[in-house]
Image (spheres, helix red, strand yellow):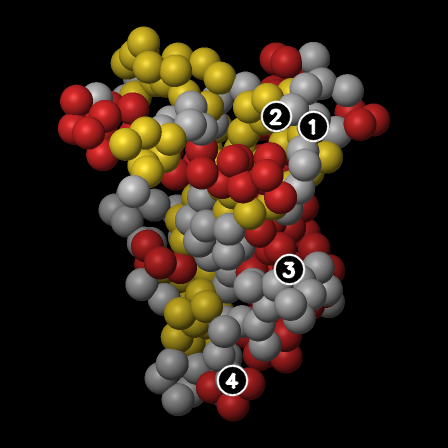
């Protein structure tokens, strides 16, 4: 039994007992290790996407970029991947004001305890009405729909990506496109846009946030954009990457 380390290596259970801190941030490290092994990544950006956030890391000249880990604002002398986390994931919800979209994330459907609109049956979405929810105290308003049958669904980035046609049938994030379109209709009507245009606007807002982090990696490590490859991992990869 080997345990993943934060720098992408592995260690025995005995080593874990003596230096448990080396397991910190080992989750993202495992994802990058997979990208190096299976995608033969030389220069690239690896984005590991869950339901709530995206962990972004960098590979240069075939090696993972390493730095000292920082935890809760405190610098450590533990070498780990340079991982930067963005509050954008497959379940990211749509922030609204006055019934119109203003932003995407960082709250997700999981935090709001709402089901995804894209992973349900079309028959479940009956007479959808746009509502707003504040998942946590002092949060801005996020969009969800309430149906005449009492069922409630969040409007998510996965729904937007499926509507826009970016998620293929063999992707983990693939869902019920017709159900998602039906759920997004009330927001699209408020926006004066088609459902597809509204979904693409949501994706643009999300991409702007991840794009800033990618640009910072390019600048910090002198990466060549012409040879840069983007690799996505995790269940929400097709919705975000």
Pointer 3 residue: 161
From the image, state whether disc 1 or disc 4 is nearer to you.
1
Residue 26, position in %: x, y? 37, 33
Q: Crowding near pointer 1: few (<14 within 10 Å), some, many (20+)?
A: some
Residue depicted at 64% across the width and 13% down the height: 221
Q: Mark 1 vs mark 2: which is more N-terminal?
A: 1
Residue, disc 4: 121
Q: Which residue is mark 2?
A: 59
- Mark 1 or mark 3, which has the lower sequence index? 1
Relative to 78, say whether 2 is above or below.
Answer: below
Q: Residues within 10 Å of mark 2 (few under 14, many from 20)?
A: many
Instruction: Give the left or right position of residue 237, taking residue 74 as reference.
Output: right
Image point (40%, 59%), residue name: 109
Residue 84 seen by the camera: yes
Do residues under tags 3 and 4 come within 8 Å of each other at their CB atoms? no
State the image quarter where residue 134 is shown: bottom left
Q: Which residue is mark 1?
A: 42
Quadrant in the picture for the N terminus: top left
């Amino acid at each position: 039994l080997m345990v993943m380390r934060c720098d992408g290596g592995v260690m025995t259970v005995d080593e874990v007992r003596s230096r448990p801190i080396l397991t910190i941030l080992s989750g993202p490290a495992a994802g990058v290790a997979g990208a190096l092994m299976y995608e033969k990544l030389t220069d690239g950006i690896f984005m590991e996407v869950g339901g709530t956030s995206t962990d972004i890391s960098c590979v240069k000249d075939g090696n993972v970029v390493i730095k000292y880990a920082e935890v809760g604002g405190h610098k450590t002398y533990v070498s780990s991947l340079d991982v930067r986390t963005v509050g954008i994931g497959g379940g990211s919800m749509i922030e609204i004001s006055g019934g119109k979209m203003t932003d995407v994330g960082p709250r997700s459907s999981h935090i709001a305890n709402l089901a995804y609109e894209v992973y349900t049956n079309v028959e479940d979405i009956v007479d959808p009405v746009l509502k707003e929810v504040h998942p946590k105290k002092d949060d801005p308003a996020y969009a969800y729909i309430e149906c005449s049958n009492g069922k409630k669904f969040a409007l998510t980035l996965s729904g937007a990506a499926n509507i826009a046609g970016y998620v293929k049938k063999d992707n983990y994030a693939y869902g019920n496109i017709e159900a998602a379109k039906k759920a997004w209709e009330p927001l699209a009507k408020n926006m004066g846009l088609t459902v597809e245009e509204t979904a693409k606007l949501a994706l643009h807002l999300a991409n702007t946030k991840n794009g800033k982090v990618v640009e910072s990696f390019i600048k910090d490590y002198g990466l060549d954009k012409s040879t840069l490859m983007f690799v996505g991992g995790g269940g929400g990869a097709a919705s975000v990457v």
